[in-house]
């Protein structure tokens, strides 16, 4: 696996987290747009020439029968908002 990320991209990865989608071979971000009833549209970085696997790291939030406490709900919503704004799995 070759890491083609720039130093700035590596630093963002360490400080903020990985992008929502990235190439498994070169670790560059990939833009994936879902299309209802069809295959998603995949746009890779110009430096990425691979056609292989795309990694989509996620944090799972499970709520049982009793639901979540208010504090936990606020924390989850903050993480979801940060992911939406930054485009990274926070």
Image: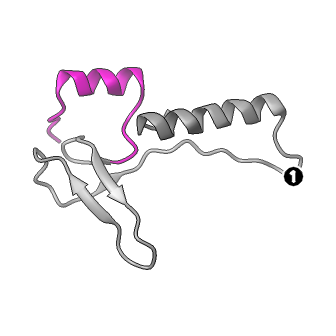
Q: Quadrant of residue 29?
A: top left
Q: Where is 14 relative to 61, above or below?
A: above
Q: Residue at x 35, y 48 (%)?
A: 21
Seen at 20% across and 52% down, the residue is 44
Q: Give how far across and how far down residue 53 sits, in percent.
A: 28, 57
**Furthest residue toward bottom:** 37
Q: How many numbered marks are there? A: 1
Against 74, is 44 above or below?
A: below
Q: Position of residue 23 (x, y in %)?
A: 25, 48
Residue assigned mark 1: 65
What secondary structure is marked by label 1?
Answer: loop
Percent position (x, y) of residue 62?
71, 47
46 over 89 or under it: above or below:
below
- Is 20 located above or below residue 70 in the figure? below
Q: Give the side of residue 66 with respect to residue 39, left or right.
A: right
> Which residue corresponds to the image point at 17% horizontal and 35% vertical from the top-left?
3
Q: Is residue 23 left or right of residue 70?
A: left
Residue 81 sits inside the magenta stretch: no
Q: Is residue 5 magenta?
A: yes
Q: Is residue 49 left or right of residue 42?
A: left
- The percent position of residue 4, horizontal first and vertical second, equals 14, 35
- To which quarter of the image does residue 27 belong? top left
Magenta stretch, residue numbers: 1-21
Q: Which quadrant: the N terminus?
A: top left
């Amino acid at each position: 696996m070759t890491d083609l990320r720039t130093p700035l991209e590596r630093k963002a990865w360490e400080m903020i987290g990985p992008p929502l989608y990235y190439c498994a071979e070169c670790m560059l971000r990939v833009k994936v747009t879902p299309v209802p009833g069809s295959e998603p549209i995949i746009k890779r970085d110009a430096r990425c020439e691979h056609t292989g696997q795309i990694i989509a790291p996620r944090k799972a939030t499970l709520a049982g029968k009793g639901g979540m406490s208010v504090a936990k709900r606020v924390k989850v919503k903050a993480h979801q908002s940060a992911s939406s704004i930054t485009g990274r799995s926070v």
